Image (tube, rainbow, N blue to C red):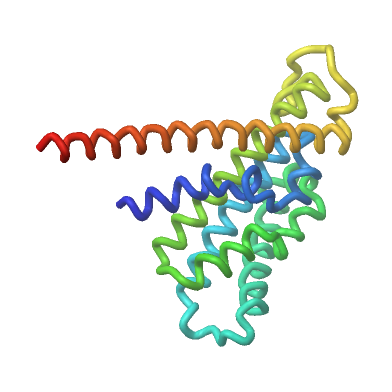
Amino acid sequence: MNKYKKITLDGLLFQNPTLMLVLGTCPTLGLISSASSAAGMGLTVVVILTLSNMLISLFRKVIPNEVRIPCYIVIIATLVTFARMLLEKFVPDLYESLGGFLALIVVNCIILGRAEAFANKHNVLESAVDGLANGFGFTAALTVMGIVCEFLGKGSIFGAKIMDFKIGIFATPAGSFIIFGLSIAVFVYVMDLFAKKKRVKENKLSRETLLNREAA
């Protein structure tokens, strides 16, 4: 169970693909001006990343090492094609808002990165957990930044008007870049504080253990 907990925490926090590893920058900067588009892209990536991880893990022993990357792309492209067809049929508004970024999921470095770094070395269940964790880590980061960016730039959240006051720059790509940069800075600062407190606690426990041994 600790193994799956580590995989989950790495994907969500310690190796968050967006805020720690700074992967998937293109869709991040292109879509966080709208909370609904950001969340929609994130959830689409969750599904594709999880399924691609599982399929690549399932076939990892039969895929020739020399052509593994092209094979990964074929698997991911097939999943993206199905996702585009389903979104166009059942969620046309989201399909239109995602635009060309939906097709670019095929070469999204988060999905290819997890396929190469994790799925081809682990079993199907572990790969599924990794896909879900990284996908939801990506989704959470995009959605939070999308909410902030849309609120400041348009005075709304998920299209619902909240206030008339708005700061125009945050409705532009420049504003998305500013929010993205600030989000990374805040997230890394918080994670560094967490790591520092954890080290202090571990050192304290080590000293207490040593003192107890000496007293015994």
Q: Quadrant of residue 177?
A: top right
Residue positioned 68% across, 69% down in the render: 77
Residue positioned 73% across, 15% down in the render: 162
Q: Residue furthest front?
A: 214
Residue positioned 46% across, 59% down in the render: 128
- Residue 204 picture location, percent across and down: 33, 33
Q: Is residue 33 left or right of residue 122?
A: right
- Residue 49 picture location, percent across and down: 57, 58
Q: Quadrant of residue 197?
A: top left
Looking at the picture, tell me which residue is in the foreground, 58 or 161. 58
Looking at the picture, tell me which residue is in the foreground, 149 or 11. 11
Looking at the picture, tell me which residue is in the foreground, 119 or 208. 208
Residue positioned 69% across, 28% down in the render: 147
Q: Residue furthest left?
A: 216
- Residue 99 picture location, percent across and down: 81, 51
Looking at the picture, tell me which residue is in the foreground, 17 or 76. 17
Q: Residue furthest top?
A: 164
Q: Quadrant of residue 106?
A: bottom right
- Residue 146 picture location, percent across and down: 71, 33
Identify the image quadrant of the C terminus. top left
Q: Is residue 49 left or right of residue 99?
A: left
